[in-house]
Image: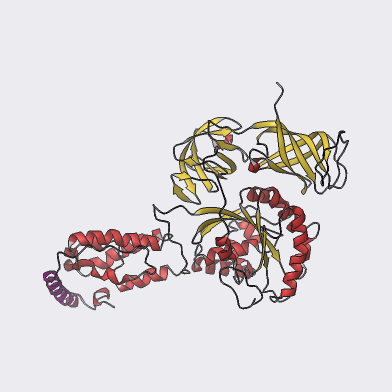
Amino acid sequence: MDSRDTAPDSWEQEDEVEAPSDAQLQSAFTALNVNAKPFVPNINAPEFVPAFFQRGPSEDPEAGGNDTGATMEVSETLAPVENGETEMNTEESWEQKEEPGEAECRSGPYRNMGSAEDPQQEEMMEEEEEMPLPKVAPALPDAPKKEHVNVVFIGHVDAGKSTIGGQIMYLTGMVDKRTLEKYEREAKEKNRETWYLSWALDTNQEERDKGKTVEVGRAYFETEKKHFTILDAPGHKSFVPNMIGGASQADLAVLVISARKGEFETGFEKGGQTREHAMLAKTAGVKHLIVLINKMDDPTVNWSLDRYEECKEKLVPFLKKVGFNPKKDIHFMPCSGLTGANLKEPTELCPWYTGLPFIPHLDSLPNFNRSSDGPVRLPIVDKYKDMGTVILGKLESGSISKAQQLVMMPNRHIVEVLSLLSDDVETDDASPGENLKLRLKGIEEEEILPGFILCNAENLCHTGRTFDAQIVIIEHKSIICPGYNAVLHIHTCIEEVQITALICLVDKKTGEKSKTRPRFVKQDQVCIARLRTAGTICLETFKDFPQMGRFTLRDEGKTIAIGKVLKLVPEKD
């Protein structure tokens, strides 16, 4: 440790210490190489090597100036999250540098401001950054943007969705160890020590007390090739409407299954949410499904291949019936959310599983093809007031930039984008698939409802109340006749709807339409019907824009039917 950094026993000693340091400095200045090349650090260096920081005062002013900029760049690249902490360290270094006396002042503290010069502070910074190593550096300005993928975690209540989400955030360095230790202590106090990982996503008190997610939790993490947004959907049947909102923003669904004896069975039986969620995800337009068989470390399972295969055998026929292709669209993998086994690294406990672990598998998936030159469509998920009106949603198509004029449908309010945040990072423009927060000018928060859509003025989305749709009745005890009321979930919009007329039945196998109008439809039948909503909503035909043309009908807390919009019926004046 440097003698200058320790507190002196008396002030006389302090003067003695100062003199030699002055002399050393003089000799250092005489041996200075004025023509030295300015130091340019390699920003992509794999490790934080603090050796070059020690040069501080012994460089010429120009090189020193460069060094500072470079140093700051390096430290920013390496620790994107701890901006606040580096500032704090700067202040400390000021105090420490003023103590040794004039000699240091002459060499100019400004030069060393960004760099962590003395070893003591070096240690402090390392302690601050006690995080798992795979921390992703922010992309360089000229680097191509990483592809955005929205992943929704679905499955029965208590299958371990939030815990897996929390564990992924920890493994990718998005939650630091210290925060998790704090959660662990708090959870232990409530005798819920296995819940601490889920608290990274379940942020409000009610969710933590009951251990049940209510609203769709949001978080994000990055891998080498992609940027992922986690949408942690609630599993409880009372909160299925929230889950539908989450699934409507997803590109990819992760169906979490609990392998524990008894838990898998309850989730998969008729009333369980495993079935309903898988079906709703398919209806919401999720094409690829990863089935994570969780809790493999449970004593009743103990990484048993037989139990894994048993779960798989029961799930495949059902998922096939829902519309997923078992060969192309579904991928099964075992894991343990609590221990993190097989999420990032392969585990020895499971020699029979030879595929990639979860995070590398996500990274290896093919890219989604999205057109950024289409019309702007951003269905609104949520809104709140914060220095203006802020809206949240996923950009389905088109691209949005700062200061752009857009139209809020169906009310036709003209709004201006003041600022754009993509996963809490401010940007100037956004491309399709990104989860955005927009601050808008020209509209009040009260005038917006979830389900409204931001469009560009040249190409507005369709609005209306009456439309014809093809419906598949999934589960309904009695018959459905004209005049039947239900709740319609279409993209992020929830609206009351009435079936005003049944037009014809459709044969499931041949697709032929019946010549006569049916008087009623019952479970497992497909029909074309005319529906009328209570208020005006934004929608498109399935053919033109699939994300805004598929819907679900729910009643009494159950999903009754799924369908797609075939034709919009213009209103009679």
Toward the top, the furthest residue is: 573
Quarter of the image holding residue 43? bottom left
- 210 over 484 or under it: above or below: below
- Judge whether residue 267 can be spotted in this image: no
Q: x, y percentage for residue 460?
A: 58, 32
Q: Which residues are magenta?
A: 14-31
Q: x, y percentage for residue 156?
A: 72, 59
Q: x, y percentage for residue 486?
A: 77, 40
Using the image as rendered, state which of residue 366 and residue 529 is in the foreground. 366
- 506 over 55 or under it: above or below: above
The N terminus sits in image quarter: bottom left
Quarter of the image holding residue 186? bottom right
Q: x, y percentage for residue 406?
A: 51, 34
Using the image as rendered, state which of residue 385 and residue 173 is in the foreground. 173
User: Which color scheme did the rendering employ for the protein?
Assistant: secondary structure
Q: Is residue 537 magenta?
A: no
Q: Is residue 373 left or right of residue 193?
A: left
